[in-house]
Image (spheres, helix red, strand yellow):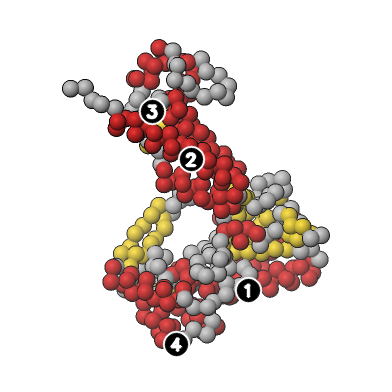
């Protein structure tokens, strides 16, 4: 975008096609924006019942976003029979200076803070508008404030739908994602009034990201599955559990260096050669042909991604404490086995 010398433009290809344009502020401006973000984060701002992202001190998260979609029936909560999901197209680049300032004024933010926001937090787009740059540390917070007002208007549409159809409908947001839950399949028609409301504000729905699901389909909102209960997606934690188990099996059988585990294809071939079928894992007493194969394929190993696995376990534990504890137990055992192997290796005397 022209007229923004304080930003470095980074273009990142999207998996779905196209390019995501990031405006990374240069160090001097970034320092100012970070100090301003600390001021903004200290403000006493309620997130409202629908906004779950980027507002510190409000305890909003993907978990609270998913919980908002559950229906309460006879004192019990359950997932709805239908799920409608929409995304706002180019949300940051359509959060104009006017929308942001109005949101700050609605929250009774002091004028000197508003002046700092005007001075530090906008760039010019190709249409002559001043908008939030995707990549600035202040943009998520300010965009969430705008979303608070947007969500309130959309909730008005949801309430009107409830009144006319006599069927409870739930609504939540996370960043620019809008999600609606209901037992009535006709709730798919909410797309049209929601589009109208967004257009009046200055936003558009991304037509490629409108999704409608009905049970027994798997309902996933921002990576959180809500079918039976709030939790991580089944493939996510099962793949993680398999990776941890395989790394632990390799460590116990002493067939990979400390801190590494075999690639899946190598492990499968090794099991075939060794004649190991079913669930029992690899063992140290491998036949000679399996040992020869292992010696030829020692390069077919992966470094154990300790930090990545720890982060994923933390995510699972946040959504489902029991599964998180199970995964953490495997991780702790793997870590202990690796530590013991490393200690034995370092204490083994070398030949003169």
**Which of the pair 25/243 is nearer the observer?**
243
SS at mark 4 in the image? helix
Residue 264, horizontal then vertical, whole percent: 46, 29
Q: Which residue is mark 2?
A: 331
Lateral position of residue 185 relative to residue 141, left or right: right
Measure the C-alpha gap from mark 2 to mark 4.
51 Å
Residue in the picture at 77% in, 57% down: 76
Q: Which residue is mark 1?
A: 152
SS at mark 3 in the image? loop
Residue density around tag 3, few if under 14, some if 14–19, many if 20 or more, within 10 Å: many
Residue density around tag 2, few if under 14, some if 14–19, many if 20 or more, within 10 Å: many
Which numbered disc flags the more N-terminal residue, 2 or 4? 4
Q: Which residue is mark 3?
A: 256
SS at mark 2 in the image? helix
Of all residues, the one furthest to the left in this rendering is 352
Residue in the picture at 47% in, 21% down: 283
| Tag 2 and tag 1, C-beta contact below 8 Å | no
Is 34 placed above or below 309 here? below
Measure the C-alpha gap from mark 2 to mark 3.
17 Å
């Amino acid at each position: 975008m022209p007229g923004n010398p304080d930003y470095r433009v980074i273009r990142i290809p999207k998996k779905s096609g196209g390019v995501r344009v990031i405006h990374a502020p240069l160090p001097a401006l970034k320092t100012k924006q970070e100090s301003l973000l600390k001021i903004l984060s200290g403000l006493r701002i309620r997130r409202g019942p629908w906004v779950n992202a980027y507002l510190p001190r409000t305890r909003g998260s993907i978990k609270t976003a998913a919980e908002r979609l559950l229906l309460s029936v006879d004192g019990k909560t359950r997932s709805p029979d239908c799920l409608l999901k929409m995304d706002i197209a180019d949300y940051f680049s359509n959060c104009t200076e006017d929308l942001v300032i109005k949101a700050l004024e609605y929250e009774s933010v002091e004028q000197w803070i508003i002046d700092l926001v005007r001075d530090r937090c906008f760039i010019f787009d190709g249409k002559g508008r001043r908008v939030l740059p995707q990549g600035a540390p202040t943009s998520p917070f300010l965009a969430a404030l705008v979303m608070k007002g947007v969500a309130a208007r959309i909730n008005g549409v949801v309430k009107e739908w409830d009144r006319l159809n006599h069927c409870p409908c739930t609504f939540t947001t996370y960043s620019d994602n809008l999600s609606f839950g209901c037992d009535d399949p006709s709730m798919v028609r909410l797309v049209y009034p929601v589009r109208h409301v967004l257009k009046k504000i200055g936003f558009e729905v991304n037509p490629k990201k409108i999704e409608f699901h009905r049970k027994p389909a798997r309902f996933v909102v921002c990576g959180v599955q809500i079918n039976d209960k709030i939790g991580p997606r089944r493939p996510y934690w099962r793949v993680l559990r398999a990776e941890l188990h395989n790394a632990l099996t390799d460590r116990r059988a002493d067939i990979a260096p400390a801190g590494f585990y075999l690639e899946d294809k190598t492990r499968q071939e090794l099991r075939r050669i060794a004649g190991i079928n079913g669930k029992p894992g690899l063992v140290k007493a491998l036949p000679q042909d399996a040992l020869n194969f292992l010696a030829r394929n020692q390069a077919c190993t992966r470094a154990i991604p300790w930090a990545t696995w720890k982060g994923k376990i933390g995510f699972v534990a946040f959504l489902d404490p029991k599964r998180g504890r199970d995964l953490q137990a495997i991780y702790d055992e793997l870590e202990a086995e690796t530590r013991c192997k490393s200690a034995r290796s370092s204490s083994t005397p070398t030949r003169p």
